[in-house]
Image: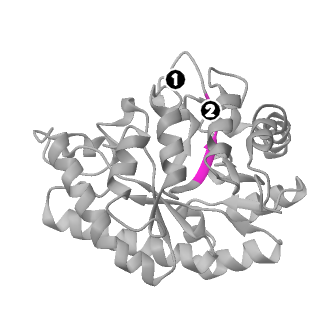
Amino acid sequence: MSFELSLNTGTTPQLSLREAVEAVAAAGLEHIGPWRHLLADAGGAEAAARIIAEAGLSATTLCRGGFLTPSEPAQRAEALESNRAAIREAATIGADELIMVVGGLPSAAHLLGGSGDRSDTSIVDARARMSEGIAELVPYAAEHGIRLVLEPLHPMYAADRAVLSTLGEALDVAGEHPAETVGVVVDTFHVWWDPQLGEQIARAGREGRIASYQVCDFNLPIASDALKSRGMMGDGHVDFATISRWVAEAGYTGPVEVEIFNEEINSQDAATTLETMTARYGELVLPALQAAAPAPAP
């Protein structure tokens, strides 16, 4: 499975899992990265697994686990149990990788519908709790054959979504555990700006940590909802050729997910989205991956 394209269902939020699966199959693709709420809406992970398998597709990742930074014991216990459920769901649908958006500060939890001490702005403490949470989940994930995949997010999301902002930070946390249990995702939207990105992708390759490559563009101006500032490849400012070359040189040959949160793209006809993303992937991403991929052993 070398560089095969996958739809992350965050790109088509108007579709149910069955509808997304049908759209992916109609577009000639074989892979899908579902979000957890779609599994629940489909009747649970077992029903979702049947929908995916009956269409001849495979699940590349499950989005998402994480949010391991609450300071209150009850909230922390709830977060850990939610992640255990996510691990079981990932195993059921055949996704080996569970994407982990690790969580932000207690002071900002209310912005995402949660609760926390609004005076608690210690990112140092939040990162420590996050690392402890990952360590607690690793044995359970390993039992189920699932790798926890840490996703560093752009620094503008550090307060509310992820206290990991760089690939290097994510690798430092992952490095406390075996590579087969904790990996990282390279998401172009989040990491394109990092002056150490090439070095850290190479490091991730040496350590066997690259579990997923996700692509979309970084659009300007930033949307009023910053989460919706992702764009279709080629519409923004990401250097896909360079980043893709680095990823391939690091030894990654797995599926490539397109994950886009953008009001216009998310509301348009899914067939149009899939047609455009397939074409842009073929023009802007795949050639660099193929050109830089190590030659197969004789």
- 109 vs 194, left or right, is left
Label 1: which secondary element: loop
- Tell which of 247 and 50 is nearer to you: 247
The amino acid pointed to by label 2 is Glu
Label 2: which secondary element: helix
- Tell which of 91 and 203 is nearer to you: 203
Count neighbours of disc 1 (C-alpha within 10 A) and say few if under 14, some if 14 to 19, many if 20 or more: few
- 70 vs 212, left or right, is left
- Tell which of 71 and 293 is nearer to you: 293
User: Magenta stretch: dominant SS?
Assistant: strand
Q: Residue at x 65, y 25 (%)?
A: 239
Q: Position of residue 193 (x, y in %)?
A: 49, 25
Q: Residue at x 36, y 66 (%)?
A: 177
Check the image and report above or below for 236 versus 49. Answer: above
Do the residues bearing badges 2 and 1 touch, measured as CB atoms within 8 Å? yes
The residue range painted magenta reads 212-217
Which quadrant, please, contains the C terminus?
bottom right
Q: Which of the two labelled residues, at mark 2 and mark 1, occupies the earlier sequence position?
A: 1
Given the current orientation, which residue lies at the most extreme top position? 221
Q: Position of residue 172 (x, y in %)?
A: 33, 50
Quadrant of residue 214 in the image?
top right
**Residues under labels 2 and 1: Cα distance?**
9 Å
Quadrant of residue 161 in the image?
top left
Q: Position of residue 295 (x, y in %)?
A: 79, 52
Q: Residue at x 32, y 37 (%)?
A: 158
The amino acid pointed to by label 1 is Ala
Q: Position of residue 122 (x, y in %)?
A: 14, 40
Determine which residue is flagged by label 1: 223
Task: Specify the label residue 263 is tagged with.
Answer: 2
Check the image and report above or below for 33 versus 127. Answer: below
Q: Residue at x 48, y 78 (%)?
A: 88
Task: Report the label total.
Answer: 2
